[in-house]
Amino acid sequence: MNKLCFILLAVLVSLAVWGQDDIEVVSVENSYVHAYLTDDTYFYDDDYNTSVVNTYYTDTAGRLDYPAGKLVEWSRVTRIASLKGSIITVSENEELTDSMTFTTKNRGDSSFVIRNLIPYRTYYYKVEEQAYNGTLTEVARGVFRTEGQLRMIYVDGSSNVRDMGGWPTSFGVPIQYGKMYRSANFNSITVRGIHDFKENLHIGAELDLRDSTENTSSVSALGADVDFIRISTTAYHNGICYVPQALTRDLQWLIDRMREGKAVNWHCLAGSDRCGTLSFLIGGLLGMNEVDLCRDYELSRFSMRSRTRSYNTFPRMLPYIRTFGPQYDLAQCFYNYWLTRDISPEDLNFLRRTMLNIETDGFETDVPEITVNKYFEPEYYNINGTKLREPQPGLNIVRGADGHYKKCGFLNTIVCIFSFIASISLTFN
């Protein structure tokens, strides 16, 4: 017994010592964004006319759509006349392989903020001064840890860039980092920005949601070796309800590129409207809850965009999505929405498994396969919401083949039923 107690005590002491080491912990979220994300107002107030984002951001603050990071400082050893600049190498292993690399903006700089880090990782870094003759001299080396949730990205020449990863989901696991990104346009992207996107974030595919009057290019601004497509997409309720064909093409293209092992990025002009709509539909499919879908949309406010959850027809999107499935399972509603937009169960399940890392974590059975037929049977309700076996005299509410609800009189209900049958016939012919 004494021996067992000693072993348990040793384990507890070891854990305590491990938790109290002197490795610096750095938050990846700037203080304004962190305060916004931890505000719990939306959990208790579902009035979309209410927004708290302006409590944490005002236009006078300028751009705040960037991450916090690790400040590294060093003493210069190379003569300024011979110094070309400094290179910062960052990796999750001490050997500094599979690393990100950054360069100082000015050749004489003796400090740098390491950004674009993934939360809850341990990072190792070194700083080397590079002379014009190519000689490298190491001047600093260290280690630190990160914390936070939201991974905003700083890229020179773009804005409103962030990783889709980190959000909690209804499947009990967070969305994976490093696979899907959203942003504003690349019109002013710099050489440093291209390096960050391609070499550090490994983005291999760019989806531009603008039309040809906004961008006439047929090649990615990141380079010809990055897959590129432009699909003119409509935002908000009009887009998801009346002209969803573009959104179907958007998601299918992204899934196809991800099947090739590529990290993907989508953007419109400012990364808030069309980009925000597609992100909303993807986030919901992956199991984000209503509050976080609103937060993700409103984060564009920190890039100086006047966007709150009451903007335009954003408040109408979620009620519409809820018509596609059980009210208690929001993720299934998004799943069914995409099914009716001709994305296959195989592709939807692939995206979920890839972005939630389900197979490697042993949660595969928690990802629901298609649980409802793609084409709904007609359902009838009275005005009080009671489900009926068949239409009754008076006013009925009919749920049709597309999952939408429609009020009909008794005779019109019969017309609705024939319309339902016709839609099924058209679908299968």
Image (cartoon, helix red, strand yellow):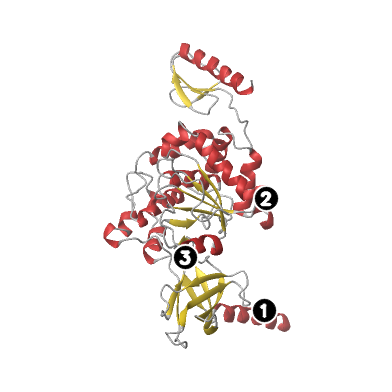
Secondary structure, mark 2, is helix
Sequence-first tag of 1 and 2: 1
Q: Looking at the image, which residue is at 46% across and 13% down?
A: 412
Q: Find residue 131 and report its horizontal and vertical position in percent.
A: 50, 82
* Image quarter of residue 95: bottom right
Mark 3 vs 2, N-terminal side: 3
The residue under label 3 is: 192
Residue 335 percent location from the top left of the image: 57, 40
Q: Is residue 93 or residue 191 the one in the foreground?
A: 191
Q: Identify which residue, 16 or 220, lies in the foreground.
A: 220
Q: Are marks 3 and 1 in contact (CB under 8 Å)?
A: no
Residue type at the position of mark 2: Glu
Instruction: Judge by depth and name the residue closer to the eye, 282 or 386.
Output: 282
When asked about the image quadrant of residue 304, the answer is bottom left
Crowd rating for badge 3 (residues with CA inside 10 Å; few <14, some 14–19, many 20+) = some
Q: Nearer the viewer, mark 3 or mark 1?
A: 3
Which residue was labeled with disc 2? Answer: 364
SS label for mark 1: helix
In screen coordinates, is 178 left or right of 188?
Answer: right
Give residue 318's quadrant in the image.
top left
Callout 3 secondary element: helix
Residue pushed farthest left? 60
Q: Disc 3 or disc 2, which is closer to the eye?
A: 3
Q: Which mark is residue 8?
A: 1
N-term mark: 3 or 1: 1
CA distance for labels 1 and 2: 35 Å
* Residue depth check, mark 1 versus mark 2: number of the one nearer the observer: 2
